[in-house]
Image (cartoon, rainbow, N blue to C red):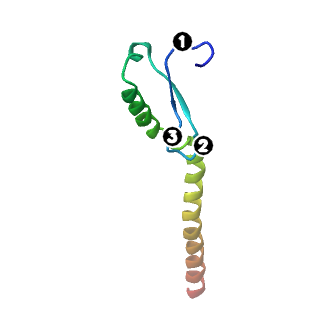
């Protein structure tokens, strides 16, 4: 139990994420009597929708666009130089 919390807690140790080792979810008081299997299933479903932290997504997106744009810029400069030499 978490100090000062008077709720049922579901601990998920298999988060299927490379970023998170475990998660603790507080069950709403009106659902504390629900079956353990149902609560665990919903917890897994919730955690599968969390995905990658936004700061990591942003870095990956920047790197993706950087690596995709630089070759195009170099090709454009090369084409401009080639056209300038030919004409």
Q: Tell me which residue sits at (63%, 15%) in the image.
A: 3
SS for tag 3?
Answer: loop
Residue 71 x %, y % = 57, 70
The local crowd at label 1, few if under 14, some if 14 to 19, many if 20 or more residues have their Cα within 10 Å, is few
Q: Where is mark 3, residue-wise?
A: 15
Mark 1 touching mark 2, by CB under 8 A? no
Marking on residue 55: 2
Looking at the picture, does residue 64 appear above or below residue 82? above
Q: How dense is the environment of label 2, judged by Cα within 10 Å: few (below 14), some, or many (20 and up)?
A: few
Q: CA distance from mark 1 to mark 2?
A: 33 Å
Quadrant of the frame with the N terminus = top right
Q: Quadrant of residue 72?
A: bottom right
**Element at badge 1?**
loop
Q: Position of residue 11 (x, y in %)?
A: 52, 29
Quadrant of residue 48 within the rendered picture: top left
Q: Who comes first in sequence, dot 1 or dot 3?
A: 1
Choose the circle earlier in sequence order: 2 or 3.
3
Give the mark count. 3
Of residues 8 and 81, which is closer to you in this image?
A: 8
Quadrant in the picture for residue 29: top left
Rate crowding at label 3 as few (under 14), some (14 to 19) or many (20 or more) other CA atoms within 10 Å: some
The residue beneath circle 1 is 6
* x 42%, y 16%: residue: 32
Query: Mark 1–mark 3 contact, CB under 8 Å?
Result: no
């Amino acid at each position: 139990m978490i100090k000062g919390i008077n709720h049922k807690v579901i601990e998920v140790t298999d988060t299927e994420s490379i970023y998170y080792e475990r998660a603790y979810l507080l069950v709403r008081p009106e659902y504390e009597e629900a079956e353990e299997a149902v609560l665990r299933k919903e917890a897994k479903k919730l955690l599968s929708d969390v995905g990658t932290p936004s700061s990591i997504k942003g870095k990956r997106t920047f790197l993706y666009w950087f690596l995709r744009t630089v070759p195009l810029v170099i090709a454009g400069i090369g084409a401009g130089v080639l056209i300038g030499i030919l004409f």
